[in-house]
Structures are given as structure tokens and as C-alpha cells.
Amino acid sequence: MASDRNWIGRNRYNEAKYLTEEYKIGVDSFIRFSMENIQQEDNGRIRCPCKECGNSCYKNPSTVKVDLYRHGIMPWYTIWDCHGEKRVEVGTNQVNIKYRDDDMYDAHDDDFEDCEDFEEEPNATAKEFYRM
């Protein structure tokens, strides 16, 4: 891996119920990595990999940091592919390479940056289908 990410799978709290230094350093390294790979069209925002957002929201880095402290990072998110990293298999070894797959990630809509949940009424065709 590009850096030590063992902090991701460990408990983020110590015995005194405070965030561990290892976790805080890991979050800082994640934020730095994300900012190094940010694209102009992201308007200074990065995806939030906390357990609540699950990389579905774009937020300011400081808000992402708070979310990661509050909710924790997704425990399986050790290859930061939504933040510019790609896993490439070379024989039986795996190597991480920085990249950005714009075709895949440019589909986000700025209207959803704060992950607001809302219910939308179905259109007339859908209502007719439901009625059947």
C-alpha cells in the first residue's frame, strides 16, 4: 500500500474513550492524499468515506475529518479508489497507483453535496404502473 493503513481496521478510541493518535494521524494522511488528488470540478470538496456517508457525498475536507472522527471510516476502505488511487494486479502482487477515473466519478450532482435525503413523487407513468 502507499502508506500504512492499519489504523483503518483498528478501534479508533483508546481505553479512556479518546481518539487514538494513530487514528488521527491516519485521518490526516487520508485528507492530505485526497487533497493531492482533488480535481478542479470538485470545487475543493472530497468524497466522505465515513460509515454514514459511504463515499456518496462530496464535502469540505474539514467536514470529512469531523465525520471520520465522529462516525469512523468504512473498515474495508483501504484502497482509496474514490480518492484517486487504483489497485493494479501485477502477477500475484498488488500495487497501488494514483489515478482519477473521471468517467466514473464525474457523475455526481452538486445538488447532493450535503447528502440531504428527500422523497420525490413518482411521475404520472410510474403512478399508473403502481396503480396496476
Image (cartoon, helix red, strand yellow):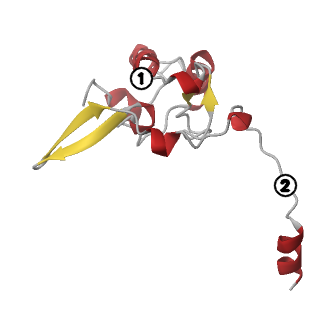
Q: Quadrant of the C terminus?
A: bottom right
* Element on which disc 1 rests: loop
The vertical placement of 29 against 120, above or below, is: above
Look at mark 1 in the image and give the residue it sits on. 37
> Hey, which quadrant is residue 22 in on the image?
top left
- Which label is found at residue 66? none
State the residue in front, 92 or 41. Answer: 41
Look at mark 2 in the image and give the residue it sits on. 120
Q: Are marks 1 and 2 in contact (CB under 8 Å)?
A: no
> Hey, which quadrant is residue 75 in on the image?
top left
State the residue in front, 25 or 2. Answer: 2
Q: Position of residue 96 (x, y in %)?
A: 25, 34
**Amino acid identity at mark 2:** Glu
The vertical placement of 79 against 61, above or below, is: below
> Hey, which quadrant is residue 66 in on the image?
top right
* Element on which disc 2 rests: loop
Question: Count the marks: how many?
Answer: 2
Q: Residues within 10 Å of mark 2 (few under 14, many from 20)?
A: few
In this image, 21 relative to 54: left or right? left
Image point 60% across, 15% down: which residue? Answer: 62
Q: Position of residue 3 (x, y in %)?
A: 27, 23
In this image, 96 relative to 65: left or right? left
**Amino acid identity at mark 1:** Asn
Image point 11% across, 49% down: which residue? Answer: 92
State the residue in front, 88 or 54. Answer: 88
- Residue lying furthest left: 91
Q: Position of residue 26 (x, y in %)?
A: 40, 20
Q: Residues within 10 Å of mark 1 (few under 14, many from 20)?
A: some
Image point 47% across, 21% down: which residue? Answer: 15
The numbered mark, 1 or 2, whose residue comes first in the sequence reads: 1
